[in-house]
Amino acid sequence: MSRTAIPFQTGDISSLARALRGQLLARESVPGHVELLNILARAVGRRNFQQLRAEAQGPQPTAADLAEAAPAEPPVDLRRVERVARCFGPDGRLMRWPAKREDQVLALWGLWSRLPPREDFTEREISALLRTLHDFGDHALLRRELFESRLVTRTPDCRAYRRIEQPVPEVAAALIRQVKGAPGGG
C-alpha cells in the first residue's frame, strides 16, 4: 500500500511541544502509532489524524462533482443492435430468442417497450400479451426473464405484474427505434 505524504506544520513550535507534553503526561503507557498520529493532530488543533489527513488531501468531491466526472454511457454498438434487431420480425414480434445473454437482455428491452406503462396485469393477462409479442412459443420464459432483468415487477404470489418505469439505456433505445421503424413494427 502506498503512503501519501501529509504535510505537518505549526506556527509555534513551543506551543506544539507544550501540547504534546501535556497529552503524553496524561497517558499511562507509551502511545502506539495511530495514537501518536492523533496526539500530533490534536496538538495542532485538529480533532484527530483523519481530519488532518482530509484537510491535506483537499476538498472531497460531492455527488454532483462525481456525476459530472462520470464517464458518459459508452457509444452504442450498432452491430449488436443490428444482430438483436434480426431476432425481430417485420411486424415487431420477437421471432427467436438470442443465444448471448447480453443480446437476450437487449431483446427484453424491445418487449418492455411494447408493454403498456402504469398498468397492472394478472399472470394470465401478461402471458397473453407476451404471446402476441413473440413467435417461438415460450411466454413463461419471457415473463420470468422480464422479471429477473428488473424490467417488470410482480407481487410475491405472482398474481400481479407491472412494467417498471425507468430510463432506457441508449443501446436499448436504438433497438426500440429500429424495431418500431420496421414495416408493421410497434
Image (cartoon, grey):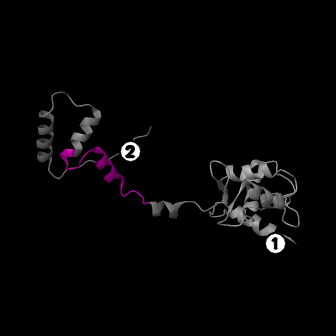
Placement of the C terminus among the 4 image quadrants: bottom right
One can see residue 77 in this view: no
Q: Is 57 in the magenta? A: yes
> Residue 153 in the image: x percent, y percent?
64, 55
**Is residue 15 or residue 171 the one in the foreground?**
171
**Is residue 118 or residue 86 the one in the foreground?**
118
Front label number (1 vs 2): 1
Q: CA distance from mark 1 to mark 2?
A: 56 Å
Q: Which residues are magenta?
A: 42-62
Residue occupied by mark 1: 181
| SS type, badge 1 | helix
Residue occupied by mark 2: 4
One can see residue 30 in this view: yes
| SS type, badge 2 | loop
> Residue 55 in the image: x percent, y percent?
31, 53
Classify residue 98 as left or right of residue 36. Answer: right
Classify residue 27 as left or right of residue 66. Answer: left
Q: Amino acid at mark 1?
A: Gly
Classify residue 100 as left or right of residue 162. Answer: right
Residue at 73%, 64% (x, y): give it: 115
Within 10 angstroms of label 1, few (less than 14), some, or many (20 or more) residues? Answer: some
